[in-house]
Image (cartoon, grey):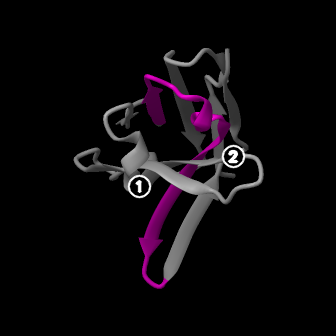
Amino acid sequence: QVQLVESGGGLVQPGGSLRLSCAASGLIFKRYRMSWYRQASGKERELVAAITSAGGTTNYTDSMKGRFTISRDNAKNTVYLQMNSLKPEDTAVYYCNAFRTITPYKYDYWGQGTQVTVSS
């Protein structure tokens, strides 16, 4: 059974930092592209950042570039999201996603989410 368990969310003041972690089990972690998504209240889920299976390539949504950093440790089956210079508009539930394709199949897994609230 695949499990993705996020942690590290919480309440932080504007300008502060948080580091989210997502621990994966039940899958061959190093074969999966890992991503962070977020969903603010009343809005659609959006991609925050993604990292390839070997960690060689990352991509970010424009509004997060320069503030957020995604990384992974394949030995620990964990992906991280370092978030700096947080803004109130970063308030959302943050979700971890694991994805790979083995044609013609797609494997797509989600964590339960962790709440991040940026407020003074």
Give the alpha-carbon distance from disc 2 to disc 1, as whole Å: 23 Å
What residue does disc 1 label?
33
Check the picture and name the quadrant holding the C terminus.
top right
Start-end of magenta stretch: 78-104
From this viewpoint, which residue is outermost toward the left? 56
Q: Are marks 2 and 1 in contact (CB under 8 Å)?
A: no
Q: Nearer the viewer, residue 31 or 55?
A: 55
What's under tag 2, amino acid-wise? Ala
Residue 114 percent across, percent down from the top left: 69, 34
Mark nearer the viewer, 2 or 1: 2
What's under tag 1, amino acid-wise? Arg
What residue does disc 2 label?
40
Residue displayed at 67% across by 39% down: 92
Task: Verify whether residue 101 appears in magenta.
Answer: yes
Q: Nearer the viewer, residue 67 or 97?
A: 67
What is the secondary structure assignment of the residue under circle 2?
loop
Residue 76 percent across, percent down from the top left: 44, 30
